[in-house]
Amino acid sequence: MRARLRLWLQVPLALLLITSNTLLHTALLLPVALLKALLPLPAWRRACSALLARIVESWIGVNSALIGLMTPMRLHVDGIDGLSRAGSYLMLSNHQSWVDIPVLQKVFNRRIPFMRFFLKKQLIWVPVLGLAWWALDFPFMQRLDRATLKKHPELRGSDVAATRRACARYRGMPVTVMNFVEGTRHTPAKHAARASPFAHLLRPKAGGVAFVLDAMGDALRVILDVTVVYPDGCPTLLDLLAGRIREVRVQVRERAIPPDLQHGDYENDAAFRARFQQWINLLWLEKDALIVRMLADAAGSRGALP
């Protein structure tokens, strides 16, 4: 009974506080974004971008503090020493839950440039957040299926062009480009339907990574290979707001960008595409084995408790 009462009280309170924080920071963000758009001078735009980044980091910091007050979640993180807010990174991560995003934001906030995701074009219409994503130069992509491309072949390559335009805006400033390489959240149903050869992962999609590296590989410092594990099973956002997540483990590995994969025509060069896919699959094979070890370590830690 007490747990149910806590759920009914805590979740609405958490939603109210996080929504209020979002509205407050968006009200600060949008005027700066408007000034940035009205005066497209390089130095002015860089100054506005820096201020926008500080506003976003403040928003993330407050959200993380609110979640920390409302949940007993223990966060174990390895591999973040030596990261820099002045660097530029390509972050590759597994993806299981919407909880991944607030977890990663908490881990990396103010340690590296804030993460920018590739978003579906339709998300620009999300109230408040769509405007904020636009103001922050988040890249919006229009995913085209095979049927659409067959009917409109002139649209082929439009996603690649959109990736290049987005990455061009990031040159000359610190940035973290975030990519959930599986392309969607992992579920047992998707794992079975896609006949994944990995125990804990879906098949990786290499194309998006290849396009980002080709567009700005020489401007990136390193790849951040991030692995997120929930020892108690995949949670939901409701679990997070209700304080039902006991533990999260995050492992970060810095990886050099292979010189022979830094630039190449992924769409039209079959040999380059094969090399790139082999590299991503090997990385995913290592990540799958790492998840097994992380889960075993978590179980061992709990078994050692008195």
Image: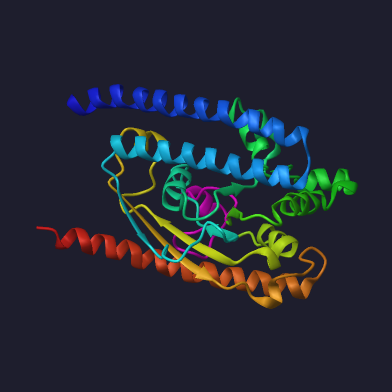
Looking at the image, the residue that sits furthest to the left is 306
Residue at horizontal 42%, vertical 36%?
63
| Secondary structure mostly taken by the magenta-highlighted segment of the chain | loop
Query: What residue lies at 69% left-to-right and 53% top-to-bottom?
Result: 170
Percent x, y of residue 172: 70, 57
Image-based side of 152 in relation to 89, left or right: right
Is 271 situated left or right of 128 in this image? Answer: right
| Magenta stretch: includes residue 146 | no
Q: Quadrant of residue 273?
A: bottom right
- Residue 125: x and y in percent read 67, 28
Q: Is residue 300 left or right of residue 66?
A: left
Q: Is residue 164 above or below residue 236?
A: below
Q: Is residue 165 visible?
A: yes
Q: Residue at x 28, y 27 (%)?
A: 7
Tell me how the rendering is colored: rainbow
Q: Nearer the viewer, residue 146 or 23?
A: 23
Along the viewing direction, whichever of 112 and 244 lies nearer the viewer: 112
Residue in the image at 49% along x and 59% along y:
201
Instruction: Give the residues drawn in magenta, as a range.
Output: 182-203
- The C terminus is located in which quarter? bottom left
- What is the tally of numbered marks visible in this picture? 0
Q: Is residue 243 visible?
A: no
Query: In the picture, residue 36 is in which quadrant?
Result: top right
Write down the quadrant of residue 214 in the picture.
Answer: bottom right
Furthest-right residue in this view = 154
Residue 227 position, x and y percent, is 45, 60
Q: Quadrant of the N terminus?
A: top left
Q: As displayed, is residue 250 above or below residue 277?
A: above
What x and y, as percent, mark residue 26? 56, 29
For residue 200: magenta?
yes
Please give left or right for residue 34 compared with residue 238 in the image: right
